[in-house]
Image (cartoon, helix red, strand yellow):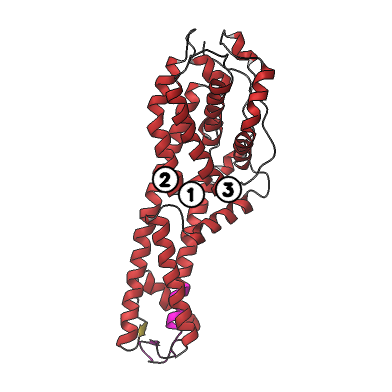
Amino acid sequence: MHWISFISGLLILLCLVFEIFWTTLGEGGGPLTNRITQLLWHLLRSHPIPHRLLSFFGIQIVLAVIAIWICLLWLGWLLVFWGSTEAVINSQTRLPADFGARVYFTGFTIFTLGTGDYVPQGSFWQVLTAIASLSGLFLITFTITYLVPVVQAAAHKRMVALTLFSLGSTPQAILANTWNGRDWSTLEQHLTTLMPELATLKQHYVTYPVLNYFNASNSSEVISLRLAALDEVLTILAYGLKEGEQCFPHGLLHPTRQLLSSCLQVMARAYALKHPQKIPPSPNLSILADHGMPVITQKQFQCNLAQLEKRRALWLALIQETGWSWLKQQPHTHI
C-alpha cells in the first residue's frame, strides 16, 4: 500500500468537495476558486484587449474553473487508485494496471463510461470505484447548479445596466432628463423601482464573485459605468444643490447611496482594489445650471467633493479595471 499517494488523493478530494460546496451553495466563491478567477483575470488583462474580446472573458473564466475542478477530481482519484499495486487490474490478463492505464481507468470511472477493460480488484477498491462514479455525477450536478444561476445573474446585470443607461448616459444627462423644472420627482419614481433590482444585483455579486468578470462590449451594458453614473447623480443631489433646495427626498437618497456603497465594496474586493490614488474629474455643474437647476458653483462643489475622494477614486479604479474610461461630461439629454 502506497499510503502517501492514497492519503494525498483523499485530501485533494476532501478539499475539492469543500470548495465545490462553498462555491455553488455558499455565499461567495471558495478560496481556491476566488484565487483562480483573480489570477486568470489579471493574466487576461495583462495586455490591452478590445472590449468585444473582453466580453467573452467571463464565460471563459467559469469554464476554466470547471476544468480545474475536473482535473482535481481526476487527480485525486488517480492518487487513490495508485495507492495499491493490486487496486486496478486488466480484466483479461489479470495483471496490475500501469500508471497510464490507471489514468484511463480513473477517467472513465468518474465520467461513468464503464468500458470494463480495467476493473478494481477486491471489495474495498470496488466500493471506492462506485464512490468515484458517484463523485463524477456529483460534479456534473453541481456544475449545472453553478452555471445556470451565474448566467441568469449575468443577464440580470445587463438588464440593470441598460435600465440605468435609459435614464441617461452621463450623470448630467440623467439629471437633465428627469428634471421637470421644479424637482426630480421622475428620478424618484425610477429609483424607487430600481432599489429592489440594485439589492438583487448586490446579492448576486456576493454569491457569485465570478460575475465581476462578465463584461460587455457596449458601454450601455457596463454595470460599473452605469452604477458610477448613478452614484455621481446622487453626489450632485447631496452635495451640489443650493442650500434650502428640497428638490429630491433625502429619505430615498441615503438608502440608494448605501446600496451603491455595498455594490462598490463587493466589486472592488473581487478585483483586489484596495487604495487607488487617482481621482476622476468633478462633474461639470455648469451644464446643469444651463438647464435651470439650483446647483452651487463649481468651486464650492469641488470643495464638497474632498470628503468623497476615496469613494470616487474606487469607482474610477473599478471602471478602468474592466477596460473602460471615466464618464463623459456631455449631457446627451432627450429634452
Position in image of residue 102 (x %, y %): 45, 81
In the image, what residue occupies the spot 39% across and 55% down? 26
Residue 40: x and y in percent read 58, 55
Is residue 197 among the parts visible in the rendering?
Answer: yes
Q: Which residue is mark 3?
A: 271
Above or below: residue 249 compared with residue 278: above
Q: Quadrant of the N terminus?
A: bottom left
Of 167 and 316, which appears nearest the observer? 316
Label 1 to label 3, Cα distance in Å?
A: 9 Å
Q: Is residue 324 above or below residue 2?
A: above
116 to the left or right of 254: left
**Residue at point 31%, 81% (across, down):** 127
Q: Quadrant of residue 233?
A: top right
Badge 2 crowding class, 10 Å Cα cut-off, few under 14, some 14 to 19, many 20 or more, is: some
> In x, y percent, where is residue 284?
65, 19
- Examine the structure image and report whether residue 41 is included in the region drawn in magenta: no
Determine contact: label 1, label 3, CB under 8 Å: no
The structure residue drawn at horizontal position 49% and vertical position 50%, both measured from the top left corner, is 210
Q: Looking at the image, is mark 1 or mark 2 earlier in the sequence?
A: 2
Give residue 294's quadrant in the image.
Answer: top right
Q: Residues within 10 Å of mark 1 (few under 14, many from 20)?
A: many
- Mark 1 → mark 2, Cα distance in angstroms: 12 Å
At label 2, the amino acid type is: Val
The quadrant in which residue 43 appears is bottom right
Instruction: Report which residue position mark 2 lands on.
Output: 151
Amino acid marked by disc 3: Tyr
Judging from the image, what secondary structure is the residue with disc 3 in?
A: loop
- Mark 1 and mark 3 lie on one chain; the one further toward the N terminus is 1
Q: Which residues are magenta?
A: 75-97
User: Do the residues under discs 2 and 3 have CB atoms within 8 angstroms?
Assistant: no
Which residue position holds label 1?
A: 209
The spot of residue 16 in percent (x, y) is: 44, 67
